[in-house]
Image (tube, rainbow, N blue to C red):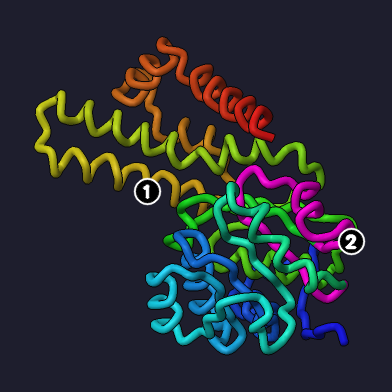
Amino acid sequence: MQPQFTLIGAKGQRNNSQKGQEDMIHSARILMVGLGNMGGAMVEGFLAKGVAPANITALDSAPAAKEKAAQWGIEMIQKPEDLAHTPHFIILAVKPQVMDVVAPAYKHLVSEGVCFLSVAAGQTIEKLKGYLAPQARIIRAMPNTPAAVGAGMTVLCGTPNLAVEQMAVAEALMACVGEVAWIEDEHLMNAVTAVSGSGPAYFFRMMEALEAAALAQGLPADVARKLAVQTAYGAGKLAAERTGTSPTDLRVAVTSPGGTTEAGLKALDAHNFTQTVSAAVEAATARGNQLG
């Protein structure tokens, strides 16, 4: 018998309220394969949004993972055959280099009622089908590290045979750790990785540079760090909350003609700031294409 669950909402009709997202995921049974940084962050997000610990099962042999599972009150199993019930979602949160060993162990669970969601970088849907089965229902997810604090950005794409319900629940699950977007063309995933996957590192580099510049101007180290971090946080929060205002408009609003901000921006432009960022994204995308 195929596992069944109740769904409220569908792709294209996303309920952005907290209650709407919680309603979508309360009845889904989840198997989390891997409780590392990303898998652990996802479980914490699920629990914070009201998913019952009884609906989450984990599989990870690491002692630290067992401690986490006990702390959260979720069941830990040693092998797929130990599952008491067929899950609705099998989330593959393992390192890409071991996916070819891990994923085939779940071939026997491939069915219309089971959706496989992979968060492993570089593992294409075609590769995952090869590990599982051609008819497997698969969603490839590209989250980023801010998911650890519930502020991630995840992009999803999936196989054509996914049910609308599976897509909606997958979106609601990933919304537990941040914002979510869908793309239809999987080939764009390398560009996604270059922007949002690698993007946090670009912002950290900007923060490093801003902190170093503050130190060079004589500011104390603790103040320099706080200025760089809080300014980045505040700018991001402002852009996220003022959804009707573009980053360009926000920049213009803080740039007075002939003022200090204008002088600083002119210096960035003189050193090809925009072109440099574009080159970083192009290089990361190209590397993703090389890696497959």
* Quarter of the image where the C terminus is located: top right
Q: Position of residue 23 (x, y in %)?
A: 67, 82
Q: What is the magenta range? A: 112-137
The residue carrying pointer 1 sits among few (fewer than 14), some (14 to 19) or many (20 or more) residues within 10 Å by Cα, namely few
Is 198 located above or below residue 103 in the figure?
Answer: above
Q: Is residue 285 magenta?
A: no
Query: From the image, which quarter does the N terminus lie in?
Result: bottom right
- Looking at the rendered structure, the kind of residue marked 2 is Gln
x, y percentage for residue 17? 62, 73
Q: Is residue 104 above or below residue 165?
A: above
Q: Earlier in the sequence, mark 2 or mark 1?
A: 2
Quarter of the figure with residue 135: bottom right
> Which residue is found at the position 68% from the left and 70% from the top?
90
Residue 120 in the magenta stretch? The answer is: yes
- Mark number displayed over residue 205: none
Where residue 114 sits: x, y (%)? 79, 73
Residue 214 position by quadrant: top left
Q: Is residue 195 shown left or right of residue 251?
A: right
Expressed as whole percent of the image width and height from the top left, the position of residue 290 reads 66, 27
For residue 135, the mark is: 2
Frontmost of labels 2 and 1 is: 2
Q: Does dot 2 land on a helix, a strand or a loop?
A: loop
Which residue occupies the foreground of this view, 212 or 218?
212
Which residue is at a point 41% across and 44% down the rendered structure image? 235
Q: Which mark identifies residue 233?
A: 1
Q: Amino acid at mark 1?
A: Tyr
Answer left or right for 59 relative to 133.
left
Residue 61's place in the image compared with 101, above or below, is: below
- Name the outermost residue toward the top: 270
